[in-house]
């Protein structure tokens, strides 16, 4: 393919999409944060699938590290297939869906509201069914996304989630880092991860590793390898990969370790170096590595926003990898842009 893919263009639109969200979403984010603060919930629940569920996992770690509020991911089928209700009084419900159309997500959020939860929808479609059944809607303001592989809507979902939680906690340092994200993301999408692209191009299987908030990014990376490159990527916490999965690692097996500049960085890098010593081809987003290959990384001034820059750099690399493998990342086989499940 000689022409730029939609995915390529949309990755370059990420900084502008985030700037648009930050410029236009302040009122909605402030109102939702105040409502959650007034409720003083005992816990949060998240409702999402696919890439949106990875954004929810990121929000889970942010919530638990920043506010002390635990987050449980609830299965949409509990309401849509099994017809059950959950006890959700004194809970806040975060629902993430780029389209806001999937019936199972909508039914779960509708049930949650009827059972006493305060529901907040994060969606790129403020007129969607999901928005209609939610008490608050945070529009992502990402603009149209044509590629089947979600990139800028994933990033804006993650930014909307961390922004909501930063407002809830009234954390000035984190809010400042969020406001500075567009400039950091401009640099992140231009990071040169070419050596990783070359290492993956001829492979059919690999591991993605993360820890804490960066584990959510590892999950998203593994999905994108499958979706855009037809590579079997599996995501593991660096705390789990040595408990069995490392057994299939052999000479040249690709591994990418996604490290933020946080308390988990040292432990994750140590595992990455251990796996590199076993013969794997390991890349890590940290300058602490000794045996693994260091990837250039854009830090954001706060450990909780670092993962957002990591996924922007990853997206730029994985699009190139798909093209190098002769695959159109805009139209993965067997997939369509909006998946509606019951």
Image (cartoon, grey):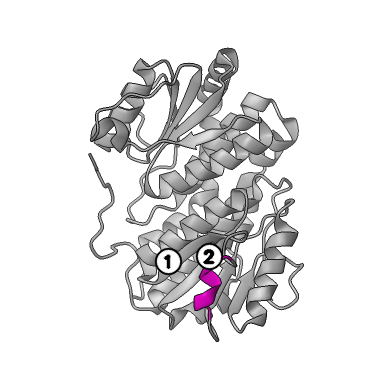
Q: Name the residue under label 2.
A: 208
Q: Can residue 176 be seen in the rendering of this structure?
A: yes
Contact (Cβ within 8 Å) of mark 2 with mark 1: yes
Instruction: Give how far apart the Cα atoms at labels 2 and 1 are.
Output: 10 Å
Mark closer to the chain start, 2 or 1: 2
Q: In this view, does 264 lie above or below 143?
A: below
Question: What stretch of residues is rendered in magenta?
Answer: 243-249
Dot 1: few (<14), some (14–19), or many (≥20) neighbours within 10 Å? many
- Residue 321: which quarter of the image? bottom left
Residue 223 located left or right of residue 302: left
Q: Position of residue 260 (x, y in %)?
A: 67, 55
Residue 65 horizontal side relative to residue 47, left or right: right
Q: Image point 53% across, 34% down: which residue?
A: 71
Q: Which residue is drawn at 31% across and 33% down?
A: 78
Q: Is mark 1 on a helix, strand or loop?
A: helix
Q: Which residue of the protein is positioned furthest toward the front in this rendering?
A: 243
Quarter where residue 209 is shown: bottom right
Residue wearing tag 1: 225
Task: Label 2: state its secondary structure.
Answer: strand
């Amino acid at each position: 393919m000689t022409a730029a893919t939609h995915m390529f263009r949309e990755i370059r639109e990420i900084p502008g999409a985030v700037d648009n969200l930050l410029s236009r979403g302040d009122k909605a984010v402030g109102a939702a944060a105040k409502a959650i603060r007034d409720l003083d919930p005992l816990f949060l629940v998240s409702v999402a699938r696919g890439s949106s569920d990875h954004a929810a996992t990121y929000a889970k770690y942010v919530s638990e590290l920043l506010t002390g509020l635990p987050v449980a991911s609830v299965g949409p089928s509990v309401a849509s297939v099994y017809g059950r209700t959950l006890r959700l009084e004194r809970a806040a419900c975060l629902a993430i869906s780029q389209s806001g159309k999937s019936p199972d997500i909508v039914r779960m959020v509708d049930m949650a509201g009827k059972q006493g939860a305060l529901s907040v929808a994060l969606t790129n479609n403020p007129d969607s069914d999901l928005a209609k059944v939610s008490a608050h809607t945070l529009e992502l303001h990402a603009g149209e996304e044509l590629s089947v592989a979600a990139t800028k809507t994933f990033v804006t979902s993650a930014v909307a989630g961390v922004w909501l939680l930063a407002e809830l906690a009234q954390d000035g340092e984190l809010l400042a880092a969020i406001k500075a994200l567009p400039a950091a993301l401009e640099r992140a999408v231009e990071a040169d991860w070419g050596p990783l692209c070359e290492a993956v191009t001829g492979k059919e299987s690999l591991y993605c590793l993360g820890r804490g908030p960066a584990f959510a990014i590892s999950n998203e990376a593994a999905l994108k390898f499958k979706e855009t490159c037809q590579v079997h990527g599996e995501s593991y916490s660096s705390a789990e990969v040595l408990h069995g999965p490392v057994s299939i690692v052999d000479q040249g097996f690709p591994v990418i370790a996604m490290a933020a500049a946080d308390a988990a960085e040292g432990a994750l890098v140590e595992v990455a170096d251990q796996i590199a010593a076993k013969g794997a081809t390991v890349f890590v987003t940290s300058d602490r590595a000794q045996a693994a290959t260091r990837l250039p990384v854009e830090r954001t001034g706060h450990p909780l926003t670092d993962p957002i820059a990591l996924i922007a750099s990853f997206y730029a690399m994985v699009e190139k990898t798909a093209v190098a493998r002769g695959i159109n990342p805009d139209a993965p086989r067997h997939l369509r842009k909006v998946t509606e499940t019951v």
